Image (cartoon, rainbow, N blue to C red):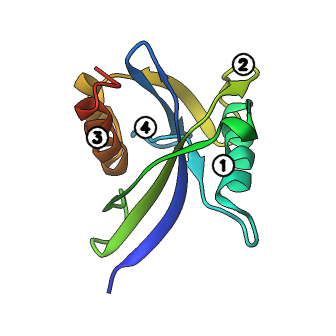
Amino acid sequence: MNKVIDKLAWLYIRNGKLLSARSKGKTLFYIPGGKREEGESDEQALIREIKEEISVDLLPESIKYAETFTAKADGKSSDTLVKLTCYYAEFQGELLADAEIEEIAFIGYQDKHLCSLGSIKVMAWLEEKDLIK
C-alpha cells in the first residue's frame, strides 16, 4: 500500500523557466508550496506556504488550478508517493528565500536534473505545453 504525501504547488514561470526552491541542507530543487493544515482549503494552504517560503502574497482571485501529478517521493521509501496539486497565481511582493528555503532559482527544462522527481514530472508537462524551455 502506497503512502501519499499530499502537497500543493505554485507554478510560476518567467522567461520559459519555472520558479523552484531548495531547502536548507537539501540538494534538489522543488516547486514551492507545501502541505495543508487541518481545515485549510487548497488556496489558503498555498497562500500560507508561499508567504512562509518565498515572502510574497499570492493574489487569491488569480489562483487557477493547473493539474495534479503523482511521483515517487525523493528520499523516502519506494512505496511513498508525492501528490502535487498545482496552481498558477499572480503575486505581489519580492521573491525572496525565507524560513527553511536556502535558495530560489528559475530552472529551465534542460536543467531538470537539479530537481525532485515530482518537479521533473511537472516540468515535462509544462514543456509539452510549450510553457517552459
Looking at the rendered structure, the kind of residue marked 2 is Glu
Of the numbered discs in the image, which one, if any, rests on residue 125? Answer: 3
Q: Identify residue for label 2.
A: 94
Q: Secondary structure at mark 2?
A: loop
User: In x, y percent, where is residue 122?
Assistant: 34, 43
Foreground: disc 2 or disc 4: 2
Residue under numbered circle 4: 29
Closer to the camera in the image, 55 or 43: 43
- Asked whether the beta carbons under mark 2 and mark 1 sit within 8 Å of each other, the answer is no
> What whole-number distance in Å separates the C-alpha atoms at marks 3 and 4?
17 Å
Chain-order first, disc 2 or disc 1 = 1
Query: SS for tag 3?
Result: helix
**Quadrant housing residue 70:** bottom left
At numbered mark 1, what does the secondary structure look like: helix, strand or loop?
helix
Q: Nearer the viewer, mark 2 or mark 1?
A: 1
Q: Amino acid at mark 1?
A: Leu
Q: Amino acid at mark 4?
A: Phe
The residue beneath circle 1 is 46
Q: CA distance from mark 4 to mark 1?
A: 18 Å
Question: Which is closer to the viewer, label 3 or label 2?
Answer: 3
